[in-house]
Amino acid sequence: MDVCSTVAKPRKPVPPPRSRPVDLYLYLLLAAATLAVYSQAIHFDFLNYDDPAYVVNNPQVRAGLTWDGLAWAFTSFHAANWFPLTWLSHMTDCQFFAMRGGWHHLTSIVIHTAAALLLFAALHRLTGARWPSAFVAFLFALHPLHVESVAWIAERKDVLCALFWFLALYWYADYARRPSIARYLPVVLAFCLGLMAKSMIVTLPFVLLLLDYWPLRRPMRRALLWEKLPLVVLSAGAVLLTFLAQEHGNAVRSLSNIPLGFRLENAVAAYAVYLVRAVWPADLAVFYPYRFDLPAWQVAASAALLATITALVIRKARTHPYLAVGWLWYVGTLLPVIGLVQVGAQSSADRYMYVPMVGLGIMLAWGASHAPRFAAIGVLAVCAVLTWRQLSYWRDTETLFQHAADVTTGNYLAHNNLGEYYLTHNRNQQAALHIQAALRIRPAYPDAHANLALVLRRAGRLADSEREYRQALALQPVSGPFHAAYAGLLIGEGRTNEAVSEFYEAIRLQPGNAATRHSLGFILLSRGRLDEALVQFRAEAQLEPGNATVHFNLGTLLASAGHFEEAAAEFTQALRIQPDFSEARARLEQARTHQK
């Protein structure tokens, strides 16, 4: 069915709105409400889920803003993604705030607030309708489904992408009313910045076509398609880069893992599930396990619901065009993440609704525009309370994953991550209980086998620990951390040659892991293989340029090998980073003496 075919003749475009004092008050209220609801997050720290890969254990990001980091951001497929602007955002946080998690959270909150303000400005400029636009912006800012995108530091890409998405809409409103190259280029710029934050913005050209129909009321001609062509080409390039990145990171599930039939069923059900969560946001979790046993009635009911809504909004497109635009916005912007190409092991994710829910907000705001204003205030107040409560579950890893385990069934990832958390806090008995629970749910879960191996190793059951490491490696042989952990066990058993081989394999798979290079360097040094050890310690220093101790250790080793000039340079670097490093200053003087 073609929405455009319902248009009998061109309609009079909506004129741009005039600014009034009430607009300023609405902007201030929107900013204040958003910051207030999310304020508790500034006391939160990093999580053990994705935050280590993105920030905590990422040497390029931890080093802050550097030329090497800039090149890495634009060329890396790290974490199975290509989003250089997101990396630069994390690097900026590390540059100014180091590893103080609360400040990283504050950055995400500020960006989310700015995105909400831009959404209000864009919709107001597009439609000329102040109060419905404000309602959609407040709903975007305060809905509990958006907590995951804002409170999870690793999801910085969501808030950044939305910021540039809404900026593109704002500039497009100007272009559509008075088309020119000068007004088109800012739209392209915002789109490119959004693509460099998260590729989900690839559906923007489709959204712009919807906005051409309503509220811009542009005549539905072929020229509208041609003007979107540059954006479509950019989208195609971003899709290709994203697919290559996710294949490189083994994030894309193959047909043999999840057959197409299951993915189609899950996609249909997910559209309905997201609708339910938008209306009734209860029992939200950080991870929803993929289900292979979806009841046929659930899939059929979801398909019937989607078909019915689609038919109704298309039928009403002439008299209530915002219904069709809002619904197609929701369906279309969710398409890249609905699971037809399965990325990750989740059946759905709250963060995927960050921008798509704007479409549902448009349907509600304009559809109920004659409802009493206190009803809208009541809805938003309920959202604010639920968001505050949902946000509290993100305070730390233990609370987050315990909540996920409580409100979902068969959540192996929640149990495994709880196990990892307890391992890092030396609560081995609790760790074992959750890791074993994860393996009961999913016996072929490599991460849980590796974690169980560590539990057994700490208990002195080395043979059982080795069995679990081998099982983890059999399930996931391309994991650098698994090889490094197994090498640690082999060292404890005195099997040094085997350990060195495992360390080298770990480095081959994950060359940017500074800790692995450090461990291998000391093992090689203990075996008298000085030149090989120097290679590892030099690489470690390159990966940890802001770590004074790393430069000091390398300088000490270089001095012992008679490389006094290089040693002096490393001691100097250590002192630049930590001027009160007295031992480095003493070693520097010794190295300079030997140079003379």
Image (cartoon, helix red, strand yellow):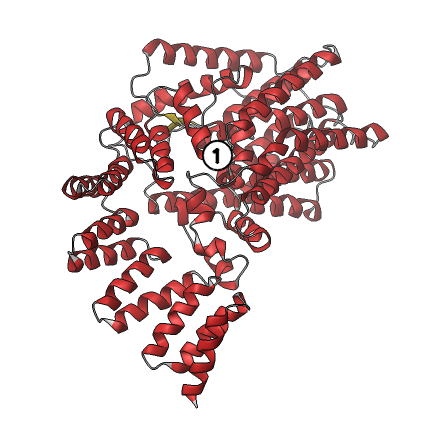
Q: Write the residue at 54% across / 68% down.
A: 580
Residue 454 relative to residue 134: left or right: left
In this view, 260 is above or below 176 = above
Q: Can you name the residue that lies furthest to the right here?
A: 21
Q: Residue 441's x, y, as percent?
A: 27, 24
Q: Write the residue at 55% across / 15% down.
A: 279
- Which residue position is annotated with label 1? 396
The C terminus lies in quadrant: bottom left
Q: Residue 382's x, y, as percent?
A: 63, 17
Residue kind at label 1, given as amino acid type: Asp
Corner quadrant of residue 22: top right
Q: Residue 57's x, y, as percent?
A: 42, 50
Q: Write the residue at 43% across / 27% down.
A: 338
Note whether residue 478 is visible: yes
Mark 1 neighbour density, 10 Å: few (under 14) some (14–19) many (20 or more): some
Note whether residue 82 is visible: no
Corner quadrant of residue 25: top right
